[in-house]
Image: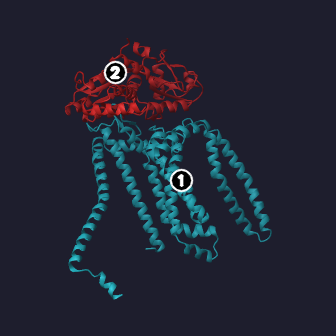
Amino acid sequence: MKLTIVLCLSLLLAGSVFGQKAEKIVIDGSTTVGPIAKAFAEYYMKNNPGVNITVSESGSGNGAKSIVNGSCQVASMSRLMKANEYEAAIGSEVLPVTHVVALDGIAMIVHPGNPVKKMTVDQVKQVYLGKIANWKQLGGPDKPIIIISRDTNSGTYETFEGKVMKGEKIAKNCEYVGSNGAIRQRVQSTPNALGYVGIGFIDNTVKALEINDVYPTPETVRKGTYPIARPLYMITNDYPKMGSHLYQFVSMYLTKKGQEIIEEIGFVPVTAY
Amino acid sequence: MKEKQNTLILSKGASRWRRLASFCLQGTLLVVTSLSLVAVLFIIYYIARDAWPFFQLNGLKEFFTSTHWYPSRHPEEFGALSIFVGSGLVTLTSILIAVPLGIAAAICLSDILPFHVRQMVKPVIEILAAIPSVAFGFFALVVFAPLLQSNGGTFLTIAFLIMAFPVSTIGLMIISKLLADRFKKDAKAVRIGAFLLLAAPVAWGMIRVCHILIRIPINSGTNTLNVSVILAVMALPTIVSVAEDALQSAGRELREGSYALGATRAETIFKVVIPAAGSGIIAAVILGVMRSIGETMVVWMASGNAAQIPDPWFNILQPVRTLTATIAGDMGEADQVTGSARYHVLFAMALCLLLFSFLSNLISEWIVNRSRKKLGLK
C-alpha cells in the first residue's frame, strides 16, 4: 500500500517534471453522451496519468455553446449542430468537426406492472399528441396515460421530436423532466406513466416497449430495424492533431476497448466487429 | 472629572489626523453600502436589456395572452400565460398552507408556550431554512410524489381532517358558548347540549367529505399540491421567525395592560397583540410569498413542468410549469450566441418576476408604514 502511494507520487512527480506538461481536456454537453465521455475519460486517464479530463453534462445546446466560445475541447452532443450554431462557430473561427462515437436507441418505457407490451411509432405519437389518453385504447387498464418527456433543452427531446412527433406539438399536459435518470425514476414509481429514455437507461425497474414489433436492443438499433434511434456525436474544433491526446480520446470509439466500454454502459458501438 | 475631560480633547494635529481617518472610513463604508444598491440596479439593467429584444421581436400580446408554450418548434410560440398561472397557483396554494400554520405557530411560540420550550422549539424551526432546496426537491420527487400517487386519497383525507377537526371543534365551542350565554339558568347544560347537538351534523358532513376525498385519484404525484406542500414547509421558518419577532416586539407592557383591564388570554392575543404586530406579520407573509415564487429547484424537480392551465384552474392535482423552472430548464438550449428570441424570452420572464417582487416589497413597505401611522408609533 505504502509502496504504491510512493510509486504513484513519484510517477506524478516524474510526470510533472519530465513528461509533457499535464494536458487538460474539458468535455461538455449532452447528458446522453455524458456516460460515454465519462467512461472514456476514466479509462484514458488511468492509462495516461499526465492527462486531466473533466466531463460536465449540461445538455447538447450548452455543449455547442461551450465549443463555440472555447470553454471546452470536446462537445458531446446527441444531435448535430444546428445551422445557427454552425454560423456562430464559424463566426468565432471555430471549425466544428463531428465524430460519430456510438448509436443510441430511444426506448419507450412503462411501469413494470403495465400489461401493455408493444406500440407503434404512430401510437406513441398519438399518445404524445394527447389523442390517445387512456391505456384502454392500447389494450391496457382503464387508466389515464401520464406522458413524460425530457426537457426541451435536451438532445433526447429533439431526437424524439424529430423521429416520433415529426414536428407536431406535444400535448400541453405532458410533464417535463430534467434527465434520463429522472424519467426512469418517475416511470418506475408511476403505474400509468409513459416516458422515453436512451436504451442505456433501461433496467429491470422499468419495462421497455416493442416499437413496431421490434424490441430496443443494440442489435436492432445497429441493424436499423428499431425505428427510434440516432447516432451520438463528439465535436471538436478542427480535426485534432494526429497522435495528440485529444485525437486519441475522440477516436477511442474505434478501439476494441472503446467499443467494450460503449457496450458496457448500454449504448451501441458504431462498428460491430 | 475635569481631568478626564481634558484627556478627551485632542491636539490640533491629532484631530486633523482623526478627521481624515474617519472621513476615509466613512467613505469606505459608503462605497460598501452603495455596492449592494449598485448591484441591484445592475441586475435590473441587465435583465431589462436582455428582455427588451424579446418584446421588440414578438410584442406583448402573445406572451401574456397565449397558452401555447412551444419554444423549440419552428415557428416558435412563446405564450407564457399558462406559466404565469402555474407560478401564481403554486405560490397561492403554498401560501394558503404556510400562512395559517406559520402565524399560528408564531402566536403559540410567543404567547402560549412556556419560555424554555420556546427557546428549544424556535431554533429547530429555523433549521428548516438551512436545508438546501435541492434536498427538498429530491424528497418531493422520490418520496412525496410516489406517496401521493399510491395513497393520494388517504393523504387528502388526513390533511382535511387535520385542518377541519380543530377548526370545527373550536367553532362549535364558540357557538355553543354564545348560545349558552343567552340562558341564565342551566347555562352549562345548554352549552353541552348545544355542542353535542351541533357536533352530530358537522361530524356527518366531515365524514361525507372524507368519503369523497378518499376516492379522488391522483394520477401524477408531481403536481401543484406536491410542490405547494414542500414550498409551504420551506416558507414556514421565514414566516414563523419574522412573525414571532413581531409578536415579541409588541411588548410585555401591552399584554399586561390588557390583562389588567380584565381581558382573557384569547382576547389579549386577538384584539391587542395581533393588531399591534400586524405590520410585522404582513411583512412575514410577504417574505413567505417571495420565498415561494422565487424557489426554483423544488418546482423544477417536482411540479411536472407541464405548460398548461389546470382544468378547472384551481385543480391543484395537475402538473403545472412555473416561471422559475422554465428559466432554469430552458437556459441550456436558449442560444445566447446568436441571441434568439428563445434566449430573450427567459429574460422577459425574469423581468416579470423581478417586477413582481419589487412591487410586493413596495406594497409591504406601504402597509407597514400605514399601520405604524395608524397605531401612532411614528
* Residue B176 higher or lower than B332, as above or below: below
Image coordinates of residue A200 in percent, x first then y, are 44, 24
Q: Nearer the viewer, residue A24 or B311?
A: A24
Q: Residue furthest bottom?
A: B2
Q: Residue at x 61, y 65 (%)?
A: B114
Viewed as shown, does residue B362 lie left or right of B98?
left
Q: How is the image coloured?
A: by chain
Label 1: which secondary element:
helix
Amino acid residing under circle 1:
Ala
Label 2: which secondary element:
strand
Q: Residue at x 26, y 37 (%)?
A: B337
Which residue is labeled 1 in the image? B98
Q: Quadrant of the N terminus of chain B?
A: bottom left
- Chain letter of the residue carrying label 1: B
* Residue B102 higher or lower than A143, as above or below: below
- Shade representing chain A: red
Image coordinates of residue A33 in percent, x first then y, are 37, 27
Looking at the rendering, which quadrant does residue A116 occupy? top right
Image coordinates of residue B368 in percent, x first then y, are 44, 65
Viewed as shown, does residue B255 lie left or right of B42?
right
Q: Nearer the viewer, residue B85 or B162?
A: B162
Instruction: Tell me if I can see residue B147 in this picture.
Output: yes
Which residue is labeled 2 in the image? A101
Instruction: Tell me if I can see residue A158 in this picture.
Output: no
Viewed as shown, does residue A2 lie left or right of B170?
left
- Shade representing chain B: cyan
Same subunit, labels 1 and 2: the answer reads: no
Mark 1 and 2 residues: CB-CB less than 8 Å, in contact? no
* Residue B353 higher or lower than B217, as above or below: below
- Chain letter of the residue carrying label 2: A
